[in-house]
Image (cartoon, helix red, strand yellow):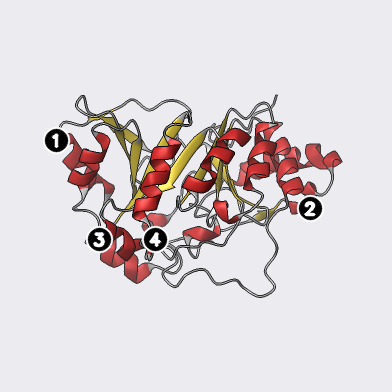
Amino acid sequence: MSVLQDRFGRAFPYLRLSVIEACNFHCSYCLPDGFHARAGRPMPLTREEIARLLRGFASVGLRKLRLTGGEPSLRRDLPEIIASAAAVGSIDSIALTTNGTLLDRRVARWRQAGLTNLNISVDALERERFHAITGHDRLDEILRGIELAQGLGFKAIKLNAVLLKGLNDDLLPQWFDYLRERDVTVRFIELMRTGDNLAYFERHHLRAETLEANLQATGWQLLQRAPDAGPAREYAHPDFAGRIGVIAPYSNDFCAGCNRLRVTHTGDLRLCLFGNVGIPLRPWLQDDADCDRLAAALQAQLGLKAIGHRLHEGETGLVPNLSTIGG
């Protein structure tokens, strides 16, 4: 089997696939005014197109898949999408990133369909703060859904919290309490600038190094990064069952270990979260016979991937907000 590689020697076994643009939250850092459908917008990829896309990626080394949005649980056929991914034998990790509002009703079905890993966005463990950040007073039901998921045998359950100065950066002690007895990982994500959040970014951006210094001062130890791991730097502490991950897109080495590609809900390949080009793959998703052409197109496009993003220079690429590509 051929494996996707770029001209810098990086391999790409990991795909983040957005299955829907719509979201039912209006988080202050992403969609503060909520999601508004645009007239005449292209429809999301169908299940058949997604199945062909995954088979094409699998033929060039896909092993890890993450389904994102928007909010992917808003797709009624999400269990069927998960099952079609599970049917591709070479994909050994099928993950979902969700806001968790439908966990208690649907997570068992997702697990049965073949979901192996689960990420839930939880930006604060304090109800009022969670409401202020996300626009929804639903923290209690989300936490109940997480507890339910913990009994379903997932390989890993991770909670994502965007690190926001003045909004949740003082809540680390609550997370410590939560992790003391729970075998989950909480990942703090440094706020990234996008096309439409400059004022918010300048007000609430906090460098991840500040958090990491706090962790190290309280006895948390940085773990060695696995060769196929994602971008998080993970910390462990002997007194805690859970772990803490830190995703620091503004760190100097963030792009060095890049191993993932992205496809939007309409089938555009993005070589980088903050890239300036989207390559339409949909023409090669209309017939099973086009699998080889899709694989060849992917291989050719990797030659255009840059060594890293240009966020430090204020370039945010095609991303107006993270709901358009799933982060």
Closer to the camera: disc 4 or disc 3? 3
Q: Which mark is residue 283?
A: 2
Contact between marks 1 and 4 (CB within 8 A): the answer is no
- On the question of residue 145 being in view, the answer is yes
Contact between marks 2 and 1 (CB within 8 A): the answer is no
Q: Which residue is mark 3?
A: 167
Q: Amino acid at mark 3?
A: Leu
Contact between marks 2 and 4 (CB within 8 A): the answer is no
Contact between marks 1 and 3 (CB within 8 A): the answer is no
Q: Earlier in the sequence, mark 3 or mark 2?
A: 3
Contact between marks 3 and 2 (CB within 8 A): the answer is no
Q: How would you rate the neighbour count of disc 2 (Cα within 10 Å): few for under 14, some for 14-19, many for 20 or more?
A: few
Residue 62 location, x and y as percent? 63, 33
Q: Residue at x 58, y 60 (%)?
A: 21
Cα–Cα gap, marks 3 and 2: 44 Å
* 47 to 151, vertically: above or below: below
Relative side of 309 to 57, left or right: left
Q: Amino acid at mark 4?
A: Arg
Q: Amino acid at mark 1?
A: Thr
* 119 to 163, vertically: above or below: above
Q: Which residue is mark 4?
A: 193
Q: Which residue is mark 1?
A: 218
- On the question of residue 254 being in view, the answer is no
